[in-house]
């Protein structure tokens, strides 16, 4: 049986950043932008997945190539490669 708990704080909602906040379609070949993500590993993975999915969608729609890389523990970058 599941216990009912009181006085447990609601965790902070993960970023609600949308692809509209990222300047993906404005990038020229060789340019990049950095997304700060100084959160726990699960949140970083979620942001990275969203960024990769957005890059894939824009790449197919605009016939471009993009690469996504983690720069360090707090940043993820997206580059237009072609």
Image (cartoon, helix red, strand yellow):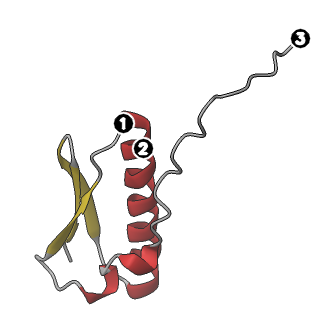
Q: Secondary structure at mark 2?
A: helix
Q: Is residue 35 above or below residue 40?
A: below
C-alpha gap between disc 1 and disc 3: 30 Å
From the image, state whether disc 1 or disc 3 is nearer to you.
3
Q: Which mark is residue 40?
A: 1
Q: Secondary structure at mark 1?
A: loop
**Residue beneath disc 3:** 1
Nearer the observer, 33 or 67: 33
Q: Residue at x 13, y 77 (%)?
A: 31
C-alpha gap between disc 3 and disc 2: 30 Å
- Lateral position of residue 34 relative to residue 7, left or right: left
- Looking at marks 3 and 2 on the same chain, the residue that comes earlier in the sequence is marked by 3
Q: Residue at x 21, y 46 (%)?
A: 74
Residues marked 1 and 3 touching at CB (< 8 Å)? no
Q: Secondary structure at mark 3?
A: loop
Numbered-mark total: 3
Residue 6 placement: quadrant: top right
**Residue beneath disc 2:** 43
Give how far across and how far down residue 33 sits, in percent: 19, 70
Q: Which mark is residue 64?
A: none
Nearer the observer, 68 or 39: 39
Give how far across and how far down residue 55 sits, in percent: 38, 69
Question: Crowding near pointer 2: few (<14 within 10 Å), some, many (20+)?
Answer: some
Residues marked 1 and 2 touching at CB (< 8 Å)? yes
Residue lying farthest to the front in this orientation: 7
Residue lying farthest to the right in this orientation: 1
- Looking at marks 1 and 3 on the same chain, the residue that comes earlier in the sequence is marked by 3
Q: Is residue 66 above or below residue 69?
A: below
């Amino acid at each position: 049986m599941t216990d009912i708990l009181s006085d447990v704080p609601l965790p902070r909602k993960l970023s609600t950043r949308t692809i509209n906040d990222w300047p993906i379609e404005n990038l020229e070949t060789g340019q990049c932008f950095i997304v700060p993500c100084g959160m726990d590993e699960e949140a970083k993975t979620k942001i990275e997945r969203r960024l990769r999915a957005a890059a894939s969608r824009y790449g197919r729609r605009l016939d471009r190539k993009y690469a996504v890389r983690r720069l360090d523990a707090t940043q993820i970058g997206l580059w237009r490669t072609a």
